Image (spheres, grey):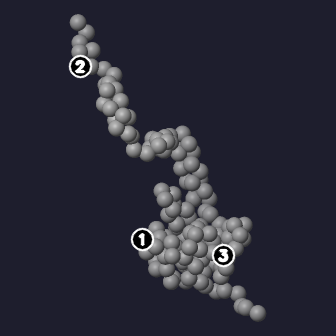
Amino acid sequence: MSEPLSGMRLDKWLWAARFYKTRALAVDEINLGRVRVGGQPVKPARDVKVGDVLSIRIGALTREVSVLGLSNQRGPAPQAQALYAETPASVTAREAAAEARRLAPEPAAAIEQGRPTKQDRRRLADWDRWSASLDDDDPG
């Protein structure tokens, strides 16, 4: 019979809570300063306890979560989501960012194929980019 955990490594908890696919990825993100505990940069071996508040930056999004439980195993998603609770401020910020992305999508995301071909570049060079010329502002 095992006794309940009082603390566990941060990288292992992030992996068990399914924030990162592997512990190695969690270690890399922690070392890059993208994971903070109580607002302070930490190391991967730092002990996480129930009640700690973590700030986790994934891409452009920063999530703030409080630790509700500890687990030595990586389980299914519902079990992993029971290990933490996202703060209300973090939820509203995440929803606002999602709405901003929906209303003003990234222009580069509209490119369906990669680099333009030589023929595409020629077509772009022939295209007149300027809608107004210098002569048009003359009222006479």
Q: Amino acid at mark 1?
A: Leu
Could you say which is closer to the camera, residue 122 or residue 55? 122
Which element type, helix, strand or loop, lies under badge 3?
loop
Q: CA distance from mark 2 to mark 3?
A: 65 Å
Q: As displayed, is residue 128 above or below residue 29? A: above
> In the rendered structure, which disc, 2 or 3, sits on the residue that comes first in sequence?
3
Please indicate whether residue 118 sits to the left or right of residue 47 in the image.
left
Q: How many numbered marks appear?
A: 3
Q: Which residue is mark 3?
A: 74
In the image, is residue 42 above or below residue 58? below
Q: Position of residue 36 (x, y in %)?
A: 49, 71
> Does any portion of residue 39 appear in the rendered image?
no
Picture quadrant where residue 103 is located? top right
Q: Position of residue 78 (x, y in %)?
A: 72, 66
* Amino acid at the residue labelled 2: Leu
* Residue 123 relative to residue 45: left or right: left
Q: Residue placed at 46% from the left, 80% from the top?
A: 43
Residue sitting nearer the eye, 42 or 92: 42
Which residue is tagged 1? 32
Return the residue nearer the eye: 47 or 118.
118
> In whole angstroms, how far apart are the C-alphas of marks 3 and 1?
23 Å
In which quarter of the view is residue 140 placed? Answer: top left
Q: Does the CB distance between marks 1 and 2 fall below 8 Å?
A: no
Q: Position of residue 27 (x, y in %)?
A: 49, 76
Q: Amino acid at mark 3?
A: Arg
Per the image, the residue denoted by label 2 is: 134
**Crowdedness of circle 2 by 10 Å Cα count: few (<14), some, many (20+)?**
few
Q: Quadrant of residue 121?
A: top left
